[in-house]
C-alpha cells in the first residue's frame, strides 16, 4: 500500500518492554530512492536522544494506535551507537549500528535489499537470511566502513524543495508516497499552487534528473506543460494499479508510474 511519510511521522515505536520513542524523520538513498533509516526521537527517557532504525526492524503497523512494534528492548536502544543525525551518516556508522543489533546490512549479502526484514516471518517484513561473508565480501565491506555515504538524505529537509521542470519552476515537494512493503519512494507529491491554483500532482523519482542540495532544488527531465496536463492528485485519489497504469501511459513506459520499472535495486515507496 502507498502511504504518505507525513502520515507516519509521529508514530510511536514500541519495544518488547516499553515505548522507545516516535518517528521524527526518514533518511533515504537519493540513488535508489529507498528509505534506509527511520529517525526515532526517544524523548525524555534518553534525554531527547535520536536513534536510527532500519525499516526492516519494524513489525506490522497499528494504524489505529499509530504505532510500530519492534523486537528490541529499551536496553538495546539505550546501548546503541550515538548517532548525530544533523550531519551526514557515514557507511561506517551504518555498519556499527547493524553490528550492534547483529543484523545484515542492506548493502551486504544481497538478502536484505530494502525491505526484507528480521524476526517477523512472512507478510509485512519477511525474515532475512544470514550467511558467512566471503573474503572478497569482507574486504569490500571493510572499504565501505570507511566511506561516507553522501547519498543518504533527510525527507524532512527535502520536503519544501522547489521543483524545476526542463523549462522552469513548477512547484515544491509537499510529501512523499512510500510503499509500505519495501519502503521505496514511489512518488513525490508536488504542490503547484503558485502556478496552477488548487492542483497537486505526483512526480516519479525517475523524472528527478538531479537534486541540487546547495539551492534546495529538484531538477526534472520533463517540461511544465507535461506536468500541468498530467493526472491530478488530491487526498481522495486512490493510487492503485489502474491509476499507476494511466500514469505510466501518460509519461511513457520506463519514465514514471510503473512499480516494476522502479525496481532496480528495490521498489519505491508511496
Image: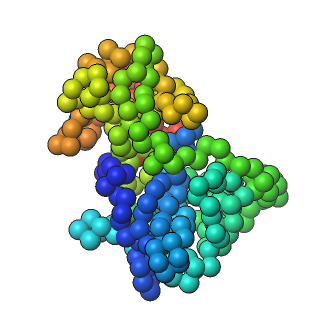
Residue 251: x, y in percent? 35, 22
* Residue 225 in the figure: left or right of residue 155: left
The residue drawn where x is 30% and y is 33% is 191
Relative image position of residue 210 (x, y in whole percent): 54, 28
- Residue 73, above or below 42: below
Q: Is residue 45 above or below residue 208?
A: below
Q: Is residue 186 visible?
A: no
Q: Is residue 104 left or right of residue 259?
A: right
Residue 153: in sight, yes or no?
Answer: yes
Colour mapping used in the image: rainbow
Q: Is residue 6 above or below residue 243?
A: below
- How many numbered circles does the render carry? 0
Viewer-side residue, 127 vs 20: 20
Residue visible at 52% across and 57% down in the picture: 37
State the quadrant of the C terminus: top left
Residue closer to the observer: 104 or 42: 42
Q: In which quarter of the view is residue 14 placed?
A: bottom left
> Farthest residue in the left direction?
236
Name the residue: 26% across, 32% down: 200
For the point 48% across and 45% down, the residue is 157
Residue 105 in picture, x, y percent from top left: 63, 60
Residue 158: give x, y in percent of width and height. Answer: 47, 41
Residue 107 left/right relative to 33: right
Amino acid at each position: 500500500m502507498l502511504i504518505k511519510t507525513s502520515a507516519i511521522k509521529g508514530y510511536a515505536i514500541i519495544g518488547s518492554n516499553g515505548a522507545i520513542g516516535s518517528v521524527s524523520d526518514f533518511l533515504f538513498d537519493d540513488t535508489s530512492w529507498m528509505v534506509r533509516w527511520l529517525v526515532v526521537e526517544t524523548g525524555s527517557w534518553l534525554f531527547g536522544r535520536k536513534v536510527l532504525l532500519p525499516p526492516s526492524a519494524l513489525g506490522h503497523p497499528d494504524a489505529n494506535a499509530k504505532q510500530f512494534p519492534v523486537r528490541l528492548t529499551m536496553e538495546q536502544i539505550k546501548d546503541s551507537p550515538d548517532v548525530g543525525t544533523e550531519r551526514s551518516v557515514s557507511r561506517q556508522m551504518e555498519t556499527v549500528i547493524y553490528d550492534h543489533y547483529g543484523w545484515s546490512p542492506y548493502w551486504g549479502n544481497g538478502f536484505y535489499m530494502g525491505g526484507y526484514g528480521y524476526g517477523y516471518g512472512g507478510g509485512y517484513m519477511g525474515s532475512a537470511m544470514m550467511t558467512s561473508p566471503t573474503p572478497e565480501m569482507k574486504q569490500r565491506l571493510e572499504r565501505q566502513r570507511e566511506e561516507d555515504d553522501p547519498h543518504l538524505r533527510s525527507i524532512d529537509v527535502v520536503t519544501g524543495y522547489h521543483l524545476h521542470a526542463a523549462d522552469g519552476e513548477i512547484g515544491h515537494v509537499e510529501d512523499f508516497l512510500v510503499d509500505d512493503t519495501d519502503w521505496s519512494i514511489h512518488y513525490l507529491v508536488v504542490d503547484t499552487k503558485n502556478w496552477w491554483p488548487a492542483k497537486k500532482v505526483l512526480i516519479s523519482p525517475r523524472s528527478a534528473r538531479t537534486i541540487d542540495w546547495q539551492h534546495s532544488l529538484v531538477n526534472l527531465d520533463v517540461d511544465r506543460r507535461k506536468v500541468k496536463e498530467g493526472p491530478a492528485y488530491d487526498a481522495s485519489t486512490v493510487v492503485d494499479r489502474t491509476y499507476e497504469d494511466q500514469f505510466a501511459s501518460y509519461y511513457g513506459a520506463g519514465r514514471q508510474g510503473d512499480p516494476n520499472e522502479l525496481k532496480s535495486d528495490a521498489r519505491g515507496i508511496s
